[in-house]
Image (spheres, rainbow, N blue to C red):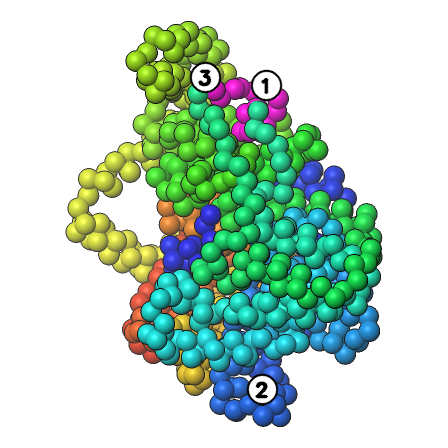
Amino acid sequence: MLRRNQIQAIAFCLIVLFPQIQKAQSSPGEFLKSSGTIPNDFLESWANKYEKSLSSSLSSGEDEDDLEDYWLSQHHQIDDLLQSGRYCFGDPMTNYLNEIADHLLRNEPELRAKIRIYTFRSPSVNAFTLADGIIAVHTGLLAHAKSEAELAFVLAHEISHYTRNHFYSSFKANREATENTWSNPSLSPLAQAENRIGRSKENEIEADQYGLDLYLKSDYALNAVDSVLTTLHRSYIPFGRKDVSTNPFCLKEGCFQIPQVFYREELSPISLSEDYADDRHSHPNIGSRRNAIHASLVQQEIREGLFYVVSEAKFHQIQEIARFEMIREKILNANYAEVLYDIYVLERDYPQSKFLAISKVKALYGLASFKAVDEISLVTPSSSKIEGPAQQVIHLIKQMNRSQLVSIALQASRSAEKLYPEDTYLKRYSSQLAKYLLVYCDESAEDFKVDGNSLPAFNQTESEFRSPRAYIRAQQSHYKDFYRYLIKEDVDKGWLATEMHKHEAFRDSIKAEKMMTVEAREERKEKQWERLEEFGSNLNVKNLVVLDPVIKVINIEEDDLDERLEGLEQERAYKESLPNWISEAGINAELLYTEHMNPSDLDSYNEFCQLEEWVYEARIYHQFGLMPVSIDIRERLPADTRYVCRIVGVVDKDDWDSYYFGLFDLKRGKIVYQRYETVGRNLSMGDLEKQTKTDLKIIAN
């Protein structure tokens, strides 16, 4: 639910050998790594790529100024994606996709050399192409595809975007739309935005047509073209089907049953309509695409073809990896409610999977965290918008009050502790959830002392009530305290009372915070800053990992070439100076600058990707005073990696130039120091030096 753009608004803003699925199950949250040498796409600066692309396109006859603007904007955006830490190369999924492309383009070696295909860590069912020939296929597409042939048609479609140069035509059309949006007032704001940043529906239909031409030259089955459109159309539906007949929140059979009154009696059927309104979509509706393809095939002879050219066995292995990886990605993206149903489905085939059990704990912890601070709507869709059996899981979550949902999560985390005692980090979920019960649910350990092992059954009949609705409400009232029985053993042994006692000081500080006036808070903040400047943070940081610092240029007009190039030069100069400033502060630093890496620096690249993910998540949770879900990442990094630093400068045409410095403690699973400073117009190297040296001094003392 929390998409990347939403999170930025809130927060300021695999593997050398083909892995066995059992390995994926036995390592909770395992990060699928890239393998081999790092491709040049990830090492070369976007400025060098810009210069090469511009030079090679000057002979095209297009206006030179337009080409400058076009390639500048393209490579600026491409660089943001490549440095996101979400691309995989050399992993089994990427290797498999490239084998499919080898077959599609076996008679076009020059084009094949220009196309580079990578897996993109995203649970959505999608793929996209960049102007320089990079194609990214989302993990979600690999998890949902029905055959290798479906993947082949998607690749053919994306290759056609590149060969038809849809990017340049869209760039000019979108720029014109940006300048003249007043001339088309019928478009919704969302549609206007998509006009500016997305390819047109005509481009998509054309990519289908030329992709079909390429696909027909292959050995793949024609029937797969129809089936992949169905796959894309139903991409919002989970890849599996399993009626929710047992408690989907349990880690093992028979842990407890949610009272039936909380279940939804009727579920919304899955819609099969393909003729939906697409004015708010970047792609035409599936019905339009299917009709256009069928029209092109009228004169074509229907041939058998193959659903698997590379390997059917490999396809199924890849899909299993993708589905497990998609679980991890959904948790990272805070799709907690949806991922619980995916886990419930996968448990049918993997009932002993430790990975799935731990993932369920993480998803429940995430839901309970946002529920505790009254922000669960950010991470849970409306149950009315979900179709099929998955709707039941969303409905159950929506039915739970704060104490009920936190207790369900606590029961799961305590069960996981007992099942996997070697994973000591699980205790931290339980401790946090006990804190939520005390601080946000206003519960005490005494409240959980109950007689018996479960609530007695509701024994009245519907005829005793004035209406069916009154009957249901009476049952809900009767069963509302079911959660008090979930951790009875821990309550009886005194665990809950001991754990809550640890958090009483935090509860008292929250109460005191609520009583403070705005003026008192501001005064306290000023005094805290004065103490930090004078005495430091008491962190005494001596070793530090620095993620690639960035100077972002935003809200600048598309044709403001000088502003963007100036931002690039500023970023280069800052990166060159930063090591000296860090050394002067008495700190040893590992600099994870991707463009400074060598092709052989694979470990550094994988470390960079993992830390990018973790920092991204930690900043979200910090906004709400919560501990991130991914608290076990330090176990997967070099032993001396503890403190991670993220520095961002923003150049904004609206006079909001700003600077951000954040220090992340992997051992404690939280941000331990951060500062966001608005520095006014024209963020200078002087500003950056002053601000950064101040922060380095504070964290070093």
Q: Calculate the distance from the C-alpha at mark 3 to the C-alpha at mark 2.
A: 67 Å
Secondary structure beneath label 2 = helix
Secondary structure beneath label 1 = loop
Q: Residue at x 74, y 69 (%)?
A: 214
- Which mark lies nearer to you, 3 or 1? 1
Secondary structure beneath label 3 = helix
Q: Residue at x 47, y 25 (%)?
A: 265
Write the start and end of the magenta stretch as one range. 246-260
Q: Amino acid type of disc 3?
A: Tyr
Answer above or below: position of 619 versus 506: below
Q: Amino acid type of disc 1?
A: Gly
Residue on which disc 1 sits: 254
Q: Can residue 148 be seen here?
A: yes
Answer above or below: position of 695 versus 54: above
Residue on which disc 3 sits: 485
Q: Residue at x 40, y 72 (%)?
A: 554
Q: Position of residue 359 (x, y in %)?
A: 58, 38
Task: Please state which of residues 662 and 463 is positioned toward the viewer in this rendering.
Answer: 463
- Of labels 3 and 2, earlier in sequence is 2
